[in-house]
Image: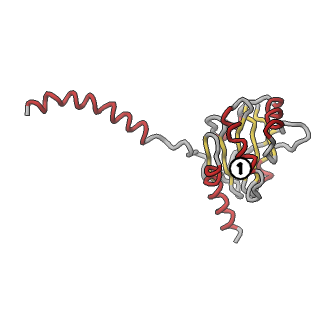
Amino acid sequence: MKRFWAFLPLAIFLAIPILGAWAMFSLRMDKKVSPLIGKPAPTVMLPAVQEGKPPLVLSELKGRVVVVNFMASWCAPCREEHPILMQAANDPRFILVGVAYKDKPSDTITMLQDLGDPFAALGADRDGTTGVAFGLTGVPETYVIGPNGTVIAKHTGPLDAPGLKRLIAPAIETRQSTSR
């Protein structure tokens, strides 16, 4: 019994960092969760990045599933996900729009000329206020807005094909169930 009491301080000393690590890694908030999910999307009225293109006004897209992608030319992961966005632009089940977050319009235009422009509309969020309204944690970040204007899902980081499919599936299902 004396041995037990002798090793108890050592056991406690070792247990504290183990419990701390467990709490930090297993109980952390999911990066895909957003306080906006289930709530109306923020009002977005952004000027177009390029002259002659339509501005980004989310309220004009109500009634459709909208995928909003926050991106920037200076963001390497944004370039990584760009081929997926190019493929997604051809999907008739939703409309893909972009928000150029704290980016110079000329840099955004150059990037899209080099890689292709998948966006039906691309707004310039030069001061980051739209990003703040969405609770943006960084770029790239993608939100799905249902036909009723409610945020359905969020994805942090670069999208891949399975990730995009998982992200839009709830919105597509919601739209199909309401159109029956």
Q: Which residue is mark 1?
A: 67
The image quadrant where one finds the C terminus is bottom right
Residue 43 percent across, percent down from the top left: 73, 45
- Identity of the residue drawn at 66% across and 47% down: 143
Query: Type of residue at label 1?
Result: Val
Observer-nearest of 132 and 167: 167
Residue 147 position in % (x across, y down): 71, 58
- In what element is the residue under mark 1? strand
Q: Say whether residue 63 is visible.
A: no
Q: How is the image coloured?
A: secondary structure
Residue ID at (57%, 45%): 32
Q: Quadrant of the N terminus?
A: top left
Front residue of this view, candidates 178 and 118:
118
In the rendered image, residue 47, in percent from the top left (x then y), is placed at 83, 38
Taking depth in this image into account, of 145 and 116 the one nearest to the observer is 116
The residue at the far right in this view is 52
Q: Is residue 69 visible?
A: yes
In which quarter of the view is residue 107 placed?
top right
Depicted 72 relative to depicted 150: above or below: above
Left/right placement of residue 138 relative to residue 54 reads: left
Front residue (pair 77, 94)? 77
